[in-house]
Amino acid sequence: MYTLKWSVLQYVILRPLLSIAGIICQKLGVLCESGSWSFRTAKAYITVIDGVSITIALYGLFLFYGLTKEELQGRRPLAKFLAIKLIVMFTFYQSLVFDALEGRVIHATQYWTLTNIADGLNALTICIEMVFFSAFMIWAYGWGEYKIKGEPRTSVWRPLWDSINYSDFAIEIAGSLKFFVDYFRGKPYAHGPRVKVIDGEGKTHTRVDFGEAFGVAPHPYDPRSAN
């Protein structure tokens, strides 16, 4: 489960690094953002690395859904999952399609380059798609299931701060890196199954506890839990 979490977090680290690499390559004149797609340009390698990274992240998220759908039963987990992840999939992979069409179907004009037209079509497509995705997200993430009876309405400032506070990314990345270091050092809490589960056929299996793997409950063998 820790490895599964890291399969997603790697994209959080790699995507900004690829953006920085793109800026540097543009400055050096080797990015070649405009023009046909070729491995003689830095853009091709950045795109491939980005594609592999996001595919691994999406695969990890699909596995995460499969492992947690029982715990989230009754809360429309599939709808919540698709409401966000389909946006990621559509926006990235359709951008690859428009890139591939540059120089083949999409041609430059007197005032617009290949990249200008491809980016414009991609942006227009995203704007149209977001109308439907936003309606789907309102349904998937309805506010009613989060309202606690008898409790006053939450102030708008707290959720606003949560939305712009990215410290949780740094905490998760640091925690995952520490886990892998402890794993290779052979610490007990980083190894072995945690709980026993019984499947539909009555067979007993072992797996990592959801709470331990995702940081909402300490592992009993973790020395930190004794403090």
Image: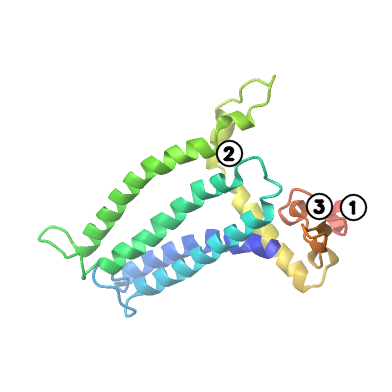
User: Between 110 and 106, which is closer to the camera in this rendering?
Assistant: 106
Colour option used: rainbow
The three-letter amino acid code for the residue at tag 2 is Asp
Label 3 or label 1, whichever comes before in sequence order: 3
Density class for disc 1 (Cα within 10 Å; few <14, some 14-19, many ≥20) is: few
Vertical order, 224 against 97 (above or below)? above
Residue 33 appears in view: no
What secondary structure is found at the residue carrying circle 3? loop
Looking at the rendering, which quadrant does residue 101 occupy?
A: bottom left
Q: Position of residue 84 (x, y in %)?
A: 50, 48
Residue at image point 42% right, 62% down: 19
Residue at image point 37% right, 40% down: 131
From the viewer's perspective, tell me whether residue 184 is left or right of residue 106.
right
Kindly identify which numbered label has been placed on residue 218. 3
- Give the distance between the C-alpha atoms of the residues marked 1 and 2, in whole angstroms: 30 Å
Kindly identify which numbered label has been placed on residue 85. none
- Give the distance between the C-alpha atoms of the residues marked 3 and 2, in whole angstroms: 24 Å
Density class for disc 2 (Cα within 10 Å; few <14, some 14-19, many ≥20) is: few
Label 1 or label 2, whichever comes before in sequence order: 2
Kindly identify which numbered label has been placed on residue 162. 2
The mark total stands at: 3
| Label pair 3/1, CB-CB below 8 angstroms | no
The three-letter amino acid code for the residue at tag 3 is Pro
What secondary structure is found at the residue carrying circle 2? helix
The three-letter amino acid code for the residue at tag 1 is Ala
Residue situated furthest bottom in the rendering: 40
Q: Which residue is mark 1?
A: 226
What secondary structure is found at the residue carrying circle 1? helix
- Give the distance between the C-alpha atoms of the residues marked 3 and 1, in whole angstroms: 9 Å
